[in-house]
Image (tube, rainbow, N blue to C red):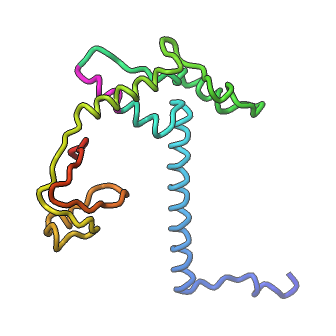
Protein backbone atom coordinates (compact mmCIF):
# COMPACT_ATOMS: atom_id res chain seq x y z
CA UNK A 1 0.00 0.00 0.00
CA UNK A 2 2.89 2.31 -0.66
CA UNK A 3 3.75 2.88 3.00
CA UNK A 4 0.32 4.20 4.04
CA UNK A 5 -0.80 1.26 6.20
CA UNK A 6 -0.67 3.42 9.34
CA UNK A 7 -3.35 5.76 7.94
CA UNK A 8 -5.89 2.93 7.77
CA UNK A 9 -5.38 1.85 11.38
CA UNK A 10 -8.23 2.63 13.77
CA UNK A 11 -7.18 3.23 17.35
CA UNK A 12 -9.86 2.16 19.79
CA UNK A 13 -9.91 4.52 22.74
CA UNK A 14 -12.40 4.78 25.58
CA UNK A 15 -14.15 7.73 23.88
CA UNK A 16 -14.36 6.04 20.50
CA UNK A 17 -15.87 2.99 22.21
CA UNK A 18 -18.41 5.19 24.03
CA UNK A 19 -19.37 6.92 20.76
CA UNK A 20 -19.68 3.60 18.94
CA UNK A 21 -21.99 2.18 21.61
CA UNK A 22 -24.01 5.42 21.66
CA UNK A 23 -24.32 5.41 17.85
CA UNK A 24 -25.31 1.76 17.85
CA UNK A 25 -28.00 2.51 20.43
CA UNK A 26 -29.39 5.34 18.31
CA UNK A 27 -29.36 3.15 15.20
CA UNK A 28 -31.22 0.35 16.99
CA UNK A 29 -33.76 2.88 18.29
CA UNK A 30 -34.40 4.21 14.80
CA UNK A 31 -34.75 0.69 13.39
CA UNK A 32 -37.28 -0.19 16.10
CA UNK A 33 -39.28 3.03 15.59
CA UNK A 34 -39.37 2.72 11.81
CA UNK A 35 -40.17 -1.00 12.12
CA UNK A 36 -43.14 -0.19 14.37
CA UNK A 37 -44.32 2.44 11.90
CA UNK A 38 -44.04 -0.11 9.09
CA UNK A 39 -46.07 -2.57 11.16
CA UNK A 40 -48.83 0.00 11.76
CA UNK A 41 -48.95 0.85 8.06
CA UNK A 42 -49.11 -2.80 6.97
CA UNK A 43 -51.88 -3.44 9.50
CA UNK A 44 -53.82 -0.43 8.16
CA UNK A 45 -53.43 -1.67 4.57
CA UNK A 46 -54.44 -5.24 5.40
CA UNK A 47 -57.54 -4.05 7.31
CA UNK A 48 -58.22 -1.22 4.83
CA UNK A 49 -58.87 1.30 7.57
CA UNK A 50 -57.27 4.29 9.20
CA UNK A 51 -56.55 4.83 12.88
CA UNK A 52 -59.73 6.89 13.28
CA UNK A 53 -61.76 4.15 11.60
CA UNK A 54 -60.17 1.63 14.03
CA UNK A 55 -61.52 3.76 16.85
CA UNK A 56 -65.03 3.90 15.30
CA UNK A 57 -65.03 0.10 14.82
CA UNK A 58 -63.87 -0.44 18.41
CA UNK A 59 -66.75 1.70 19.71
CA UNK A 60 -69.17 -0.08 17.34
CA UNK A 61 -68.17 -3.47 18.75
CA UNK A 62 -68.45 -2.14 22.31
CA UNK A 63 -71.98 -0.81 21.58
CA UNK A 64 -73.05 -4.30 20.46
CA UNK A 65 -71.55 -6.27 23.35
CA UNK A 66 -74.07 -8.67 24.82
CA UNK A 67 -76.27 -8.63 21.71
CA UNK A 68 -76.49 -10.84 18.65
CA UNK A 69 -75.89 -7.85 16.37
CA UNK A 70 -72.48 -7.52 14.73
CA UNK A 71 -70.87 -4.59 12.96
CA UNK A 72 -69.11 -5.16 9.66
CA UNK A 73 -66.62 -2.54 8.54
CA UNK A 74 -67.83 -1.64 5.04
CA UNK A 75 -64.43 -1.11 3.40
CA UNK A 76 -62.76 -4.36 4.50
CA UNK A 77 -62.85 -6.42 1.31
CA UNK A 78 -60.54 -9.18 2.52
CA UNK A 79 -56.75 -9.12 2.84
CA UNK A 80 -55.97 -9.74 -0.83
CA UNK A 81 -58.35 -7.14 -2.24
CA UNK A 82 -57.37 -4.62 0.45
CA UNK A 83 -53.72 -4.92 -0.55
CA UNK A 84 -54.62 -4.75 -4.25
CA UNK A 85 -56.32 -1.39 -3.66
CA UNK A 86 -53.07 0.08 -2.32
CA UNK A 87 -50.27 -1.79 -4.11
CA UNK A 88 -51.00 -1.24 -7.80
CA UNK A 89 -48.47 -1.41 -10.63
CA UNK A 90 -50.31 1.31 -12.53
CA UNK A 91 -50.14 3.71 -9.55
CA UNK A 92 -53.67 4.82 -10.43
CA UNK A 93 -56.11 5.50 -7.63
CA UNK A 94 -58.95 3.06 -7.07
CA UNK A 95 -62.34 4.71 -7.32
CA UNK A 96 -63.16 8.36 -7.82
CA UNK A 97 -62.41 9.53 -4.26
CA UNK A 98 -66.09 9.82 -3.39
CA UNK A 99 -67.60 6.39 -3.93
CA UNK A 100 -65.63 3.33 -2.82
CA UNK A 101 -66.15 -0.38 -3.23
CA UNK A 102 -67.81 -1.79 -0.11
CA UNK A 103 -68.22 -5.24 1.41
CA UNK A 104 -71.29 -7.33 0.78
CA UNK A 105 -74.22 -6.32 2.98
CA UNK A 106 -72.92 -2.77 3.40
CA UNK A 107 -73.38 0.48 1.53
CA UNK A 108 -71.56 3.80 1.23
CA UNK A 109 -73.27 5.11 4.38
CA UNK A 110 -72.84 2.18 6.78
CA UNK A 111 -69.98 3.87 8.61
CA UNK A 112 -71.77 7.23 8.66
CA UNK A 113 -74.91 5.69 10.18
CA UNK A 114 -72.75 4.00 12.82
CA UNK A 115 -71.07 7.28 13.70
CA UNK A 116 -74.45 9.02 13.97
CA UNK A 117 -75.68 6.24 16.29
CA UNK A 118 -72.54 6.62 18.42
CA UNK A 119 -73.16 10.39 18.64
CA UNK A 120 -76.79 9.77 19.66
CA UNK A 121 -75.61 7.35 22.38
CA UNK A 122 -73.13 9.97 23.59
CA UNK A 123 -75.86 12.61 23.77
CA UNK A 124 -78.09 10.16 25.67
CA UNK A 125 -75.45 9.52 28.33
CA UNK A 126 -74.52 13.19 28.72
CA UNK A 127 -75.12 14.53 32.22
CA UNK A 128 -75.33 18.18 33.25
CA UNK A 129 -73.49 19.27 36.35
CA UNK A 130 -73.39 22.54 38.19
CA UNK A 131 -69.95 23.58 39.42
CA UNK A 132 -69.79 23.82 43.23
CA UNK A 133 -66.08 24.62 43.59
CA UNK A 134 -64.07 27.04 41.47
CA UNK A 135 -61.43 25.57 39.11
CA UNK A 136 -58.58 27.85 38.04
CA UNK A 137 -57.73 26.03 34.82
CA UNK A 138 -54.10 25.83 35.91
CA UNK A 139 -51.95 22.95 34.64
CA UNK A 140 -50.69 22.34 38.17
CA UNK A 141 -53.67 23.15 40.44
CA UNK A 142 -51.80 22.38 43.66
CA UNK A 143 -52.98 25.44 45.59
CA UNK A 144 -56.53 25.65 44.20
CA UNK A 145 -57.53 21.95 44.03
CA UNK A 146 -55.11 20.15 46.32
CA UNK A 147 -52.36 17.58 45.99
CA UNK A 148 -54.48 14.62 44.75
CA UNK A 149 -55.90 16.60 41.81
CA UNK A 150 -52.50 18.11 40.98
CA UNK A 151 -50.77 14.72 40.66
CA UNK A 152 -53.58 13.11 38.61
CA UNK A 153 -53.89 15.27 35.49
CA UNK A 154 -56.34 14.15 32.82
CA UNK A 155 -54.97 12.33 29.76
CA UNK A 156 -55.60 15.09 27.25
CA UNK A 157 -53.76 17.76 25.33
CA UNK A 158 -56.77 20.07 25.37
CA UNK A 159 -56.42 23.34 27.25
CA UNK A 160 -57.86 23.45 30.72
CA UNK A 161 -60.68 25.87 31.29
CA UNK A 162 -61.50 28.06 34.23
CA UNK A 163 -64.80 27.22 35.93
CA UNK A 164 -66.69 29.36 38.43
CA UNK A 165 -69.30 28.32 40.99
CA UNK A 166 -72.66 27.99 39.26
CA UNK A 167 -71.28 27.23 35.78
CA UNK A 168 -73.05 24.38 33.99
CA UNK A 169 -70.99 21.66 32.23
CA UNK A 170 -72.04 18.70 30.11
CA UNK A 171 -70.10 15.54 30.97
CA UNK A 172 -69.96 12.58 28.56
CA UNK A 173 -67.03 10.56 29.96
CA UNK A 174 -66.19 9.38 33.43
CA UNK A 175 -62.80 7.78 32.90
Image position of 118 (left or right of 150): right
64 in magenta? yes
Q: Residue at x 26, y 24 (%)?
A: 65
Question: Image quadrant of residue 61?
Answer: top left
Spot occupied by residue 93 in the image (x, y as percentages of width and height): 71, 31
Question: Image quadrant of residue 9?
Answer: bottom right
3 in magenta? no
- Provide the residue span drawn in magenta: 59-66
Secondary structure mostly taken by the magenta-highlighted segment of the chain: helix
- Looking at this view, is 120 or 139 the one in front? 120
Whether 37 is drawn above or below 148: the answer is: above
Whether 125 is drawn above or below 99: the answer is: below
Number of marks present in the image shown: 0
- Looking at this view, is 66 or 25 the one in front? 66
Whether 17 is drawn above or below 80: the answer is: below
- Looking at this view, is 4 or 29 the one in front? 29
| Quarter occupied by the N terminus | bottom right
Spot occupied by residue 150 in the image (x, y as percentages of width and height): 20, 67
Amino acid sequence: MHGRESLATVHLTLWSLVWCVFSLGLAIGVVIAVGMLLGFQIRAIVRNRTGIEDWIVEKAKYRREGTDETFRFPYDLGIRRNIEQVARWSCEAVGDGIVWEVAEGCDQYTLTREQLSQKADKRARTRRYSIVKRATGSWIPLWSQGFCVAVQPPCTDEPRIQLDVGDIVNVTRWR
